[in-house]
Image (cartoon, helix red, strand yellow):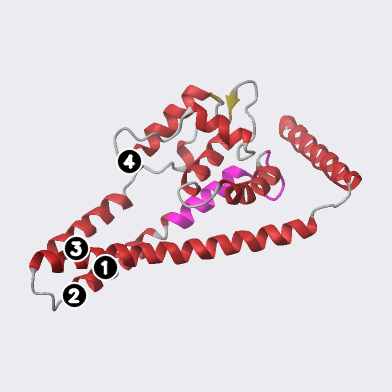
Protein backbone atom coordinates (compact mmCIF):
# COMPACT_ATOMS: atom_id res chain seq x y z
CA UNK A 1 0.00 0.00 0.00
CA UNK A 2 1.62 3.23 -1.09
CA UNK A 3 1.66 6.61 0.65
CA UNK A 4 -1.11 7.84 -1.63
CA UNK A 5 -3.46 5.23 -0.16
CA UNK A 6 -2.58 6.29 3.39
CA UNK A 7 -3.41 9.85 2.42
CA UNK A 8 -6.77 8.59 1.13
CA UNK A 9 -7.42 7.03 4.56
CA UNK A 10 -6.49 10.32 6.26
CA UNK A 11 -8.89 12.23 3.99
CA UNK A 12 -11.61 9.67 4.65
CA UNK A 13 -11.18 10.06 8.41
CA UNK A 14 -11.53 13.82 8.15
CA UNK A 15 -14.75 13.36 6.18
CA UNK A 16 -16.12 10.86 8.68
CA UNK A 17 -15.40 13.27 11.52
CA UNK A 18 -17.66 15.81 9.81
CA UNK A 19 -20.57 13.45 9.13
CA UNK A 20 -24.03 14.89 9.66
CA UNK A 21 -24.85 13.09 12.91
CA UNK A 22 -28.16 13.72 14.64
CA UNK A 23 -27.24 16.35 17.20
CA UNK A 24 -29.36 16.49 20.38
CA UNK A 25 -30.68 19.99 19.62
CA UNK A 26 -31.82 18.97 16.14
CA UNK A 27 -34.43 16.46 17.30
CA UNK A 28 -37.88 18.11 17.00
CA UNK A 29 -39.92 18.67 20.14
CA UNK A 30 -43.17 18.02 18.29
CA UNK A 31 -44.61 14.60 17.50
CA UNK A 32 -44.21 13.39 13.92
CA UNK A 33 -46.08 11.08 11.58
CA UNK A 34 -44.18 8.16 10.11
CA UNK A 35 -43.46 9.89 6.78
CA UNK A 36 -41.99 12.82 8.67
CA UNK A 37 -39.85 10.47 10.78
CA UNK A 38 -38.35 8.72 7.75
CA UNK A 39 -37.70 12.07 6.07
CA UNK A 40 -36.00 13.46 9.18
CA UNK A 41 -33.75 10.40 9.58
CA UNK A 42 -32.87 10.33 5.90
CA UNK A 43 -31.95 14.02 5.84
CA UNK A 44 -29.73 13.78 8.92
CA UNK A 45 -28.07 10.41 8.24
CA UNK A 46 -27.74 10.50 4.45
CA UNK A 47 -23.96 11.01 4.78
CA UNK A 48 -23.78 7.54 6.34
CA UNK A 49 -25.01 5.81 3.20
CA UNK A 50 -22.50 3.61 1.42
CA UNK A 51 -24.51 3.70 -1.82
CA UNK A 52 -26.95 6.30 -3.08
CA UNK A 53 -29.89 3.89 -3.14
CA UNK A 54 -29.32 2.62 0.43
CA UNK A 55 -32.26 3.15 2.78
CA UNK A 56 -31.66 4.76 6.16
CA UNK A 57 -35.10 3.95 7.53
CA UNK A 58 -38.34 2.73 5.98
CA UNK A 59 -41.92 2.32 7.21
CA UNK A 60 -41.46 -1.45 7.19
CA UNK A 61 -38.35 -1.16 9.36
CA UNK A 62 -40.15 1.03 11.90
CA UNK A 63 -43.13 -1.37 12.06
CA UNK A 64 -40.78 -4.33 12.53
CA UNK A 65 -38.90 -2.55 15.33
CA UNK A 66 -42.22 -2.05 17.13
CA UNK A 67 -43.28 -5.67 16.56
CA UNK A 68 -39.92 -6.88 17.93
CA UNK A 69 -40.27 -4.68 21.03
CA UNK A 70 -37.29 -2.53 20.09
CA UNK A 71 -39.41 0.60 19.77
CA UNK A 72 -42.44 1.61 21.87
CA UNK A 73 -45.59 1.94 19.75
CA UNK A 74 -46.60 5.39 18.47
CA UNK A 75 -49.35 7.38 20.14
CA UNK A 76 -52.20 8.05 17.71
CA UNK A 77 -49.82 7.24 14.83
CA UNK A 78 -47.37 9.90 15.97
CA UNK A 79 -43.76 9.50 17.11
CA UNK A 80 -42.17 11.63 19.82
CA UNK A 81 -38.57 12.83 20.09
CA UNK A 82 -38.02 9.86 22.44
CA UNK A 83 -38.97 7.57 19.55
CA UNK A 84 -36.39 9.35 17.38
CA UNK A 85 -33.67 8.85 19.99
CA UNK A 86 -34.44 5.12 20.15
CA UNK A 87 -34.51 4.86 16.35
CA UNK A 88 -31.09 6.51 16.20
CA UNK A 89 -29.65 4.01 18.68
CA UNK A 90 -31.19 1.16 16.65
CA UNK A 91 -29.67 2.54 13.44
CA UNK A 92 -26.15 2.36 14.83
CA UNK A 93 -26.56 -0.86 16.82
CA UNK A 94 -28.11 -2.87 13.96
CA UNK A 95 -24.88 -2.64 11.94
CA UNK A 96 -23.13 -4.66 14.61
CA UNK A 97 -25.59 -6.44 16.89
CA UNK A 98 -28.38 -8.99 16.57
CA UNK A 99 -32.02 -8.06 17.16
CA UNK A 100 -32.03 -9.99 20.46
CA UNK A 101 -28.93 -8.13 21.68
CA UNK A 102 -30.49 -4.79 20.76
CA UNK A 103 -33.62 -5.83 22.67
CA UNK A 104 -31.50 -6.60 25.73
CA UNK A 105 -29.96 -3.13 25.53
CA UNK A 106 -33.00 -1.06 24.66
CA UNK A 107 -35.78 -2.68 26.68
CA UNK A 108 -34.43 -1.45 30.05
CA UNK A 109 -33.72 1.94 28.47
CA UNK A 110 -37.28 2.44 27.19
CA UNK A 111 -38.92 0.88 30.26
CA UNK A 112 -37.06 3.15 32.68
CA UNK A 113 -36.48 6.37 30.77
CA UNK A 114 -38.87 6.65 27.79
CA UNK A 115 -41.41 8.57 29.85
CA UNK A 116 -38.69 10.26 31.91
CA UNK A 117 -38.23 10.03 35.67
CA UNK A 118 -36.30 11.58 38.54
CA UNK A 119 -33.17 9.71 37.45
CA UNK A 120 -33.16 11.17 33.96
CA UNK A 121 -34.78 11.21 30.54
CA UNK A 122 -33.90 9.93 27.08
CA UNK A 123 -33.15 13.54 26.19
CA UNK A 124 -30.44 13.70 28.88
CA UNK A 125 -29.13 10.22 28.04
CA UNK A 126 -28.87 10.92 24.31
CA UNK A 127 -26.97 14.16 24.94
CA UNK A 128 -24.41 12.41 27.15
CA UNK A 129 -23.97 9.45 24.79
CA UNK A 130 -23.60 11.82 21.82
CA UNK A 131 -20.89 13.82 23.60
CA UNK A 132 -19.07 10.67 24.71
CA UNK A 133 -19.00 9.29 21.17
CA UNK A 134 -17.96 12.58 19.58
CA UNK A 135 -15.09 12.74 22.03
CA UNK A 136 -13.78 9.41 20.73
CA UNK A 137 -13.40 10.48 17.09
CA UNK A 138 -9.90 11.89 17.50
CA UNK A 139 -8.60 8.74 19.19
CA UNK A 140 -10.23 6.48 16.61
CA UNK A 141 -8.68 8.49 13.76
CA UNK A 142 -5.25 8.25 15.36
CA UNK A 143 -5.62 4.47 15.79
CA UNK A 144 -6.69 3.94 12.16
CA UNK A 145 -3.78 6.02 10.86
CA UNK A 146 -1.35 3.99 12.98
CA UNK A 147 -2.74 0.81 11.42
CA UNK A 148 -2.36 2.36 7.96
CA UNK A 149 1.31 3.10 8.66
CA UNK A 150 1.84 -0.45 9.96
CA UNK A 151 0.33 -1.78 6.74
CA UNK A 152 2.68 0.37 4.68
CA UNK A 153 5.62 -1.40 6.31
CA UNK A 154 4.22 -4.92 5.81
CA UNK A 155 5.35 -7.14 2.91
CA UNK A 156 8.12 -4.68 2.07
CA UNK A 157 10.25 -7.48 0.61
CA UNK A 158 7.70 -8.33 -2.10
CA UNK A 159 9.28 -7.07 -5.32
CA UNK A 160 6.24 -6.90 -7.57
CA UNK A 161 4.61 -3.51 -6.96
CA UNK A 162 1.01 -4.58 -7.64
CA UNK A 163 1.31 -7.65 -5.41
CA UNK A 164 2.99 -5.67 -2.61
CA UNK A 165 0.38 -2.91 -2.67
CA UNK A 166 -2.49 -5.41 -2.65
CA UNK A 167 -1.00 -7.30 0.32
CA UNK A 168 -0.50 -4.04 2.21
CA UNK A 169 -4.09 -3.03 1.46
CA UNK A 170 -5.21 -6.51 2.62
CA UNK A 171 -3.17 -6.01 5.80
CA UNK A 172 -5.00 -2.78 6.63
CA UNK A 173 -8.43 -4.32 6.06
CA UNK A 174 -7.41 -7.31 8.21
CA UNK A 175 -6.14 -5.09 11.04
CA UNK A 176 -9.32 -3.03 11.04
CA UNK A 177 -11.51 -6.14 10.81
CA UNK A 178 -9.70 -7.80 13.70
CA UNK A 179 -10.22 -4.67 15.77
CA UNK A 180 -13.96 -4.76 15.02
CA UNK A 181 -14.08 -8.52 15.69
CA UNK A 182 -12.45 -8.18 19.11
CA UNK A 183 -14.66 -5.26 20.14
CA UNK A 184 -17.78 -7.05 18.89
CA UNK A 185 -16.88 -10.04 21.06
CA UNK A 186 -16.40 -7.78 24.07
CA UNK A 187 -19.76 -6.08 23.43
CA UNK A 188 -21.57 -9.42 23.08
CA UNK A 189 -19.97 -10.74 26.28
CA UNK A 190 -21.01 -7.61 28.16
CA UNK A 191 -24.58 -7.94 26.88
CA UNK A 192 -24.70 -11.66 27.76
CA UNK A 193 -23.46 -10.92 31.28
CA UNK A 194 -26.00 -8.11 31.68
CA UNK A 195 -28.82 -10.36 30.41
CA UNK A 196 -27.79 -13.12 32.82
CA UNK A 197 -27.75 -10.76 35.79
CA UNK A 198 -31.07 -9.20 34.79
CA UNK A 199 -32.68 -12.62 34.42
CA UNK A 200 -31.77 -13.44 38.02
CA UNK A 201 -33.57 -10.31 39.18
CA UNK A 202 -36.77 -10.93 37.18
CA UNK A 203 -39.79 -12.01 39.32
CA UNK A 204 -40.43 -15.69 38.74
CA UNK A 205 -44.10 -16.10 39.65
CA UNK A 206 -47.01 -14.75 37.63
CA UNK A 207 -48.30 -12.71 40.57
CA UNK A 208 -44.86 -11.14 41.12
CA UNK A 209 -44.58 -10.18 37.46
CA UNK A 210 -48.11 -8.76 37.50
CA UNK A 211 -47.39 -6.72 40.63
CA UNK A 212 -44.17 -5.32 39.17
CA UNK A 213 -45.93 -4.36 35.93
CA UNK A 214 -48.67 -2.57 37.87
CA UNK A 215 -46.06 -0.74 39.94
CA UNK A 216 -44.23 0.46 36.81
CA UNK A 217 -47.52 1.59 35.28
CA UNK A 218 -48.41 3.55 38.42
CA UNK A 219 -44.98 5.20 38.48
CA UNK A 220 -45.30 6.29 34.85
CA UNK A 221 -48.78 7.69 35.48
CA UNK A 222 -47.50 9.67 38.45
CA UNK A 223 -44.53 11.01 36.45
CA UNK A 224 -46.84 12.05 33.61
CA UNK A 225 -49.15 13.78 36.07
CA UNK A 226 -46.23 15.73 37.58
CA UNK A 227 -45.11 16.86 34.11
CA UNK A 228 -48.63 18.03 33.24
CA UNK A 229 -48.80 20.04 36.46
CA UNK A 230 -45.67 21.90 35.38
- Is 174 within the magenta? no
**Front position among marks 3 and 2:** 2
The CA distance from mark 3 to mark 2 is: 16 Å
What is the secondary structure assignment of the residue under circle 2? loop
Residues in magenta?
A: 115-133
Q: Quadrant of the N terminus?
A: bottom left
SS class, disc 1: helix
CA distance for labels 1 and 3: 13 Å
User: Which quarter of the image is occupied by the C terminus?
Assistant: top right
Say which element carries label 4: helix
Mark number for residue 6? 3
Q: Closer to the N terminus: mark 1 or mark 2?
A: 2
Residues at badges 1 and 3 in contact (C-beta under 8 Å)? no
Q: Is residue 87 left or right of residue 140?
A: right
Distance Cα–Cα, label 4 vs label 1: 27 Å
CA–CA distance between discs 1 and 2? Answer: 9 Å
**Overall secondary structure of the magenta section:** helix
Lower position in the chain sequence, tag 3 or tag 4: 3
**Residue under label 2:** 155
Q: Is 62 situated left or right of 209 in this image?
A: left
Using the image, determine if residue 137 lies above or below residue 47: below
State which tag comes first along the sequence, 3 or 2: 3
Q: Would you say residue 2 is visible in this rendering?
A: no
Distance (Cα) linking label 4 and label 2:
35 Å
In the rendered image, is residue 180 in sight? yes
Label 3, residues with CA under 10 Å away: few <14, some 14-19, many ≥20: many
Q: Residue at x 19, y 57 (%)?
A: 8
Residue 225, percent from left and from top: 77, 32
Viewer-nearest residue: 189 or 38: 189
Amino acid sequence: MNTEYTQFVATLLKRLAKLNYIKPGEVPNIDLYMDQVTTFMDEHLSDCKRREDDKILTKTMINNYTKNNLLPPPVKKKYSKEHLYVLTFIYYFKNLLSISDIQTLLNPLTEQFFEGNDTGSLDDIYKQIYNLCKGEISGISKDVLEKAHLSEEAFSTVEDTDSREFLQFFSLVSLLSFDVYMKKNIIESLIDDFASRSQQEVPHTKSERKAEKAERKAEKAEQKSRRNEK
